[in-house]
Image: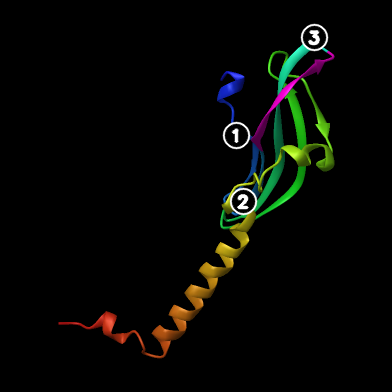
Amino acid sequence: MPEPDEIEDEALFTRGRATGGWSRKRVLVEDLPERFCSVCERDRPFKLYLGYTVRNVQHFFRWVTDKSYFIECLFCRTGTVVTDAEAGPFVTGNPVRWFDRFGWVVGIGVIAMVLVLGHWLVNGRLGFLFWSF
């Protein structure tokens, strides 16, 4: 098991088939100052994480669902879910990976390129690619 400081981005659970599925991920957002931990019963350092679910079809069409922030004690590994307003001061930018956020755009772009190239091939505009010597 990795140490708490080594965990930055991990897939917590993956489920699906070759045609589609989903995965639950968590991303380290920020190291928080010490605060009281109710399990350890003393002041401990915490980390703020963003947990989210990524749905996908063929791994090209991706979109994010079910985002939630949570804080976790580094010693006992217990945590609580916090609201977006509570996590807001510590969040800079969007911690979700670019491909997880905009994967659906990449999928649509691939389909558009295939359609345009297919149209050009059918109409003979790319015939120079298939010259035979």
| Disc number lying in front (2 or 3) | 3
The percent coordinates of residue 4 (x first, y second) are: 61, 21
Tell me the kind of residue under disc 2: Asp
Q: Quadrant of residue 87?
A: top right
Instruction: Give the structural element (helix, strand or loop) at label 2.
Output: helix
Q: Position of residue 110 (x, y in %)?
A: 51, 68
- Placement of the N terminus among the 4 image quadrants: top right
Residue at the (65%, 44%) spot, across then down: 95
Q: Amino acid at mark 1?
A: Glu
- Distance between the alpha carbons at the discs numbered 2 and 1: 13 Å
- Residue 51 vs residue 15, the one in the foreground: 51
What secondary structure prevails in the magenta region?
Answer: strand
Q: Position of residue 35 (x, y in %)?
A: 78, 19
Q: Secondary structure at mark 1?
A: strand
Mark 1 or mark 2, which is nearer the start of the sequence? 1
Q: Position of residue 127 (x, y in %)?
A: 31, 86
Check disc 1 and report the residue beneath it: 10
Residue 114 higher or lower than 64, as above or below? below
Q: Which residue range is magenta in the image?
A: 26-38
Residue bearing the label numbered 2:
100
What is the CA distance from the residue labelled 2 to the residue labelled 3?
37 Å
Q: Which mark is residue 42?
A: 3
Is 36 covered by the magenta stretch?
yes
Callout 3 environment at 10 Å: few (<14), some (14 to 19), or many (20+)? few
Mark nearer the viewer, 1 or 3: 3
Frontmost residue, 35 versus 125: 35
Q: Secondary structure at mark 3?
A: strand
Give amino acid for label 3: Arg
| Quadrant assignment, res 120 | bottom left
Q: Residue shown at 74%/15% (left/top)?
A: 44
